[in-house]
Amino acid sequence: MAAAAGMGQQWVLVEMVQAFYEAPAYHLILEGILILWIIRLLFSKTYKLQERSDLTPKEKEELIEEWQPEPLVPPVPKDHPALNYNIVSGPPTHIITVNGKECINFASFNFLGLLDNEKVKSAAQASLKKYGVGTCGPRGFYGTFDVHLELEERLAKFMRTEEAIIYSYGFATIASAIPAYSKRGDIVFVDEAACFAIQKGLQASRSNIKLFKHNDMADLERLLKEQETEDQKNPRKARVTRRFIVVEGLYMNTGDVCPLPELIKLKYKYKVRIFLEESLSFGVLGEHGRGITEHFGINIDDIDLISANMENSLASIGGFCCGRSFIIDHQRLSGQGYCFSASLPPLLAAAAIEALNIMEDNPDIFQTLRAKCERIHKALQGISGLKVVGESFSPALHLQLEESCGSRENDVKLLKRIVDYCMDSGIALTQARYLEKEEKCLPPPRSWTTVLSAMGVLLSRVCEEQQDAL
Amino acid sequence: MANPSAVCNGHLHHHHHQKQNNILKSGIYKKNGITKGMKKNGVSNGTLHKKTITEHFEQAPMYVAVLTFLGFGVGTIFGYLRDFMRAWGLEKRNVAAEREQQKDFVPLYQDFENFYTRNLYMRIRDNWNRPICSVPGPQFDLMERVTDDYNWTFRFTGRTIKNVINMGSYNYLGFAETDVNALKTVTIELQKYGTGICSTRQEMGTLDKHVELEKLVAKFLGVEDAMVFGMGFATNSMNIPALVGKGCLILSDELNHTSLVLGARLSGATIRIFKHNNMQSLEKLLRDAIIYGQPRSRRAWRKILILVEGIYSMEGSIVRLPEIVSLKKKYKAYLYLDEAHSIGAVGATGRGVVEYFGMSPDDVDVLMGTFTKSFGAAGGYIAGKKDLVDFLRTHSHSAVYATSMCPPVAEQIIRAMKCLMGLDGTTQGLQRVRQLGKNTRYFRRRLHEMGFIIYGNDDSPVVPLLLYMPGKIGAFARRMLEKNIGVVVVGFPATPITESRARFCVSAAHTREMLDTRGLKADVSGLFHSRCSSQRTKIW
């Protein structure tokens, strides 16, 4: 077998040698040159193309030595207005001690006057005795207390929705709710005057944001129509792109309400969902304090999600979202501020439940609040140089300079003088604070005036002070 | 399932057994360059050099990984089957549905996104969100919950399960208590101030209590100044954007908490991730960042911020602070340390990882922490140099737009901190810290002796016990509850898919009997021995 193979091989070799002799000369020369070239390439040194970023280690060390970062924080001037806080000693109720001086509190959002209510405090005390202070865990890991479940049930019942979910911080409520539903590629139509928490929620969601002019339904409809024409170009994408409108019930930045009935019409016409933020209008608008849906007489199921914080009317801490179970249940796994944060301390939840009880038992406090709002609004109208921004029934009003002094800083300085003067005379006002570089549409400088339902009538004094200040 | 901590990027981790000896035996010490750097720095603190960092991350045997994937595979197949049956009406739909009037709207959720929730999470859903009706101390009372339709809905029977041993709440120093004497000051302040504030820090919301608390926090940590916020999660998500912005670089650990990730994303800076606690990965990123600058434009970075945590609550590992500090000094980066779990829990007097490693608080640029875990309250703080805190007072989103901390909670933190610092005249604070250390070491040793795979540093009170298989997750938690022990189990997506675990939080208030009971009972239920192969996988 091997011999036969050997014979075969020899025979092939012979053939090869024969072929070698029979080949034309140029063929042999060409192949010879190629073989020599290959041998040369094999034995020559390899080299790399010189890369632009191929630095020597020495150069790298130099770069590292030379690099100087900015300081971690830029220096803040010592007289920055925000650096000198007003320190309140004692409870921030309607008589407040600011920087050692007693004033009437026109600056806290204590709309229903529940901050120093004895019943609320005793409910909180009872809860403190039973549960201690903190919950030591998020909702998923033994941080769900029976008070939380009770508060959620009560809120859902009060607002007449299927379900409610509580957050432990007001700011985090809407800022976690929006990204839970709206993701990258979805479209959100939001009012220009939306508050900062909504802006952060939108930023976290990475969706496409379309701003429409404040309370301008024609502008919103224009944007919706544009979106519709876009959809027709690409129907497959349109079928999976979710759309939302985010509005506030009572805008914090302008003090007026959104035109909810028109929004509902637009919702069904263009098939967008509505998220309503009711931090200022919960416990204020409506016959029983249920917010702007009651104010306009709209079926609450038409609104997909209502979010509010409990830090204004309910005089507690935290926030809640309410709506249908189909929508709210989703946040229990995907609301970041709910899943990854400790739950609300039980004493605050108990205080909120008691506050809800008071709201349900005394529905006439809303009438009282509205009457007082109207009075203050009217009384502040006559001051020259200052204009009142906000609806007549809004408990939080802005006082803005009618004519600007030239630059924002000068406006701010003048307003500060007014506020200081008022404080010296016993009325606590505050300047509305904004982060200048962060806000999308920066409102002009102004100062707050809030109305407390349980405070006495000292309107004339307010007007006098304002007039004198100017 | 809800998880309070780590966000894994979904990659499978191959942790290997790491045992780092001290610097004197530098042969075993992997990172020679950094070792030399530390010696040069002259940090000749006795504690630091003698510290033996033992962290265990043992890898499971192969058959366990195979069985885990098999378990998930079977679960997925059944999931598809169930979905099919539901779509064709063969099975009742238990999920809430969209309104009739809005059926032609774009669907709010995509079916596929919720596949895992519907089919796998729903089966074992009864192990989370368990409501309690007492103080979350070393023992608590659970409300009894039953389900008639396989976890789609629950109903309360009205009974309470009393005196369940609490291994799930973050009560490291045992300050979650209802002792009347202990809460005396809190009661007084609650009566005086009420519960709410109704204003932001910059407007009318700064009470004298906040000023007192901030001074105390600064004194406790040994820094110049501190600022407190109403929510721990919000502390991260609202202050990181104030510190860094576009053109800055954030180097964040793989297993950082969601709040850090959210804060980093909201800031607009570029984010790069380094492997968990891996100093070589971090150094490489630092060098590349400084040498090559920003991508495409090659401009230099404005600043570089390293985000790490003190104790990582899903792994139980402690950050390698000395090495990070030396790296940060060499490359002129800034360090942001989130001590949510480590403040009060580690260190000789409970001052966190900075004290644990014997370093000075000046080495860390931004010290952040929360009061929820070790102080039994709520809220967060940021501490550091006066410039930093002044800047945050003016530019933090929380100071301008969010409510401040409520007074009774502030008082609880003040009394807990005074107790820890010994300012109330007793040594109770120090005793608590020592008791926690003892409990931690004892507990870990016992579990180790029994043969379970435990992750993390020997000194960390967070003890993850690896279960691996999906069937064990539900079975373990339910079995423990039957034996009156409340545990926390975590699975995908909070952890890598093959590394589901049960997590125990040791507390200073646990007595030795409680820890023994728990250990013995785990032994008795030997079904869940990590190396045991005979287990009932309840996938049905």
Image: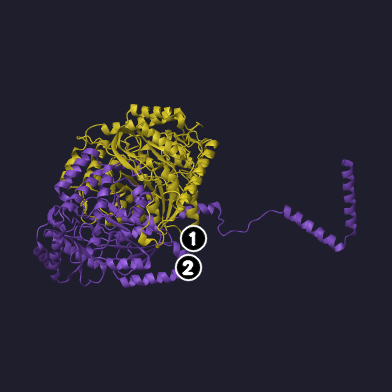
Chain colours: A purple, B yellow
Q: The N terminus of chain B lies in which quarter of the figure? A: top left
Q: Is residue A358 left or right of residue B147?
A: left
Number of numbered discs overlaid on the protein picture: 2
Q: Residues within 10 Å of mark 2 (few under 14, many from 20)?
A: few
Place of residue A352 in the rendered image (x, y in percent of width and height, measured from the top left)? 22, 49
The circle on residue A18 is none
> Could you tell me how far apart the alpha carbons at marks 2 and 1 are, in whole angstroms?
38 Å
Residue underneath mark 2: A234
Q: Is residue A326 left or right of residue B230?
A: right
Task: Label 1: state its secondary structure.
Answer: loop
Task: Give, as a three-letter code, the residue at label 2.
Answer: Asn
Q: Could you tell whether B374 is left or right of B43 in the image?
A: left
Nearer to us of marks 2 and 1 is 2
Return the residue found at the far front: B90
With A55 as the anchor, is B230 left or right in this view? left
Neighbourhood count class around disc 1 (C-alpha, 10 Å): few under 14, some 14–19, many 20 upward: few
Query: Could you tell me the amino acid type at mark 1?
Result: Arg
As drawn, B421 above or below B193: above
Q: Position of residue B55 (x, y in %)?
A: 45, 36
Label 1 belongs to which residue? B298
**Residue B428 versus residue B196 in the image, above or below:** above
Q: Quadrant of residue B462?
A: top left
Return the chain for callout 1: B
Near-viewer residue (B71 or B78)? B78
